[in-house]
Image (spheres, helix red, strand yellow):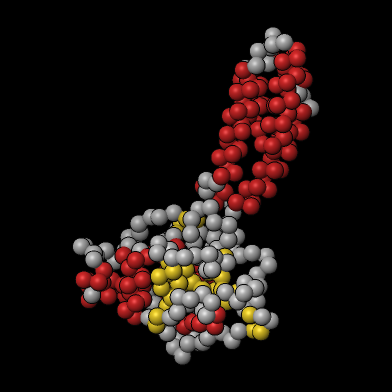
Amino acid sequence: MAELLTAATPISYYLVAVNIIAFILYGTDKAKAMHHQWRIKEAVLIGIAFVGGAFGAFAGMIVFHHKTRKMKFRILVPIAIIIWLTLGGFLAERDVVGLTKTDRPKNEYNGTEITPYHSSVDKDGDGTDDQTDILKNALVYVKKRPVYKSRYYQTGYPDDRYGVCTDVVGYALKKSGYDLRELVDKDIRKNSKDYDIDEPDKNIDFRRVKNLRIYFEHTATSLTMDVNDIEQWQGGDIVVFKNHIGVISDRRNVEGVPYVIHHNDPYQKNYEEDILQERTDIVGHFRIS
């Protein structure tokens, strides 16, 4: 519910605009207008009311004290409001970012299941290898349904319900035993010329895509950026775009190309999406261990 109250969406703007129009049309029509003119406007108002403007129409009627219209639309307005609320609730629910598509495919290609990669390293000693841990923890993070918003945190990691693309990776790695806040800061101070940072700030540096790309180039295994090299892309890998980053999913489209677990913007429909083939700005593909 919090997301619904804070996330501005195109549908929200649409409903506001429609209600303003309805308010003006309904509220400013003079009672002494000619009968046939009112009929034309009445038809327009009915149309507007039923696609989301009932509240504005009703408000305009009240503000301008059109008593005759109150009587005339005594039945229409409540019905329109009910329809508007029902429609608005349905559309608002659709505006909440979902975890993934309902038709989430299997980890296979041409009907043959792809053997998932397992790391020989278990950094956090929880009994689960790094590759599996990173994938699992990325999914745990997006299940929290973070709201896209860039903020600065004294602790480095977001401690509220907000986040950006780098936080998907940051959370997944931290829960797998890799504290990027400390690790990136250490690498920046060791290789400052590579990062081009005047004043390092460990609370934010690890949450910048360009810095993570450099860090992974220094510490992780670099892999192919050819999305058609199907088996080289495994769930738990990190993919870096020019201005974006995400974790590779273990789900694949019909062509075998994996989905990406990511957080791109406030209007994103799902946290796990089939976007890898359509991106032309892949600049890095990494495996942590």
Q: Position of residue 161 (x, y in %)?
A: 48, 58
How many numbered markers are drawn? Answer: 0
In the image, taking residue 229 as reference, residue 40 lies left or right, namely right
Q: Quadrant of residue 166?
A: bottom left
- In the orientation shown, which residue stands out farthest toward the right? 75
Nearer to us in this view, 148 or 126: 148
User: Depth check: 114 or 67 in front?
Assistant: 114
The residue positioned 59% from the left and 64% from the top of the image is: 99
In x, y percent, where is residue 250?
57, 77
Q: Examine the rendered structure and indicate whether residue 145 appears above or below residue 71.
A: below
Residue farthest along the top direction in this orientation: 32
Q: Quadrant of residue 283?
A: bottom left
Q: Is residue 215 visible?
A: yes
Q: Is residue 44 placed above or below 30 in the rendered structure?
A: below
Q: Residue at x 35, y 59 (%)?
A: 153
Whole-percent x, y for residue 289 in the image: 42, 84
Q: Nearer the viewer, residue 81 or 209?
A: 209
Q: Is residue 71 left or right of residue 281?
A: right
Which residue is pictured at 52% across the width and 45% down the height? 8
Q: Quadrant of residue 11?
A: top right
Rendered location of residue 4, percent (x, y): 57, 49
Residue 156 seen in the figure: no
Relative to 196, residue 177 above or below? below
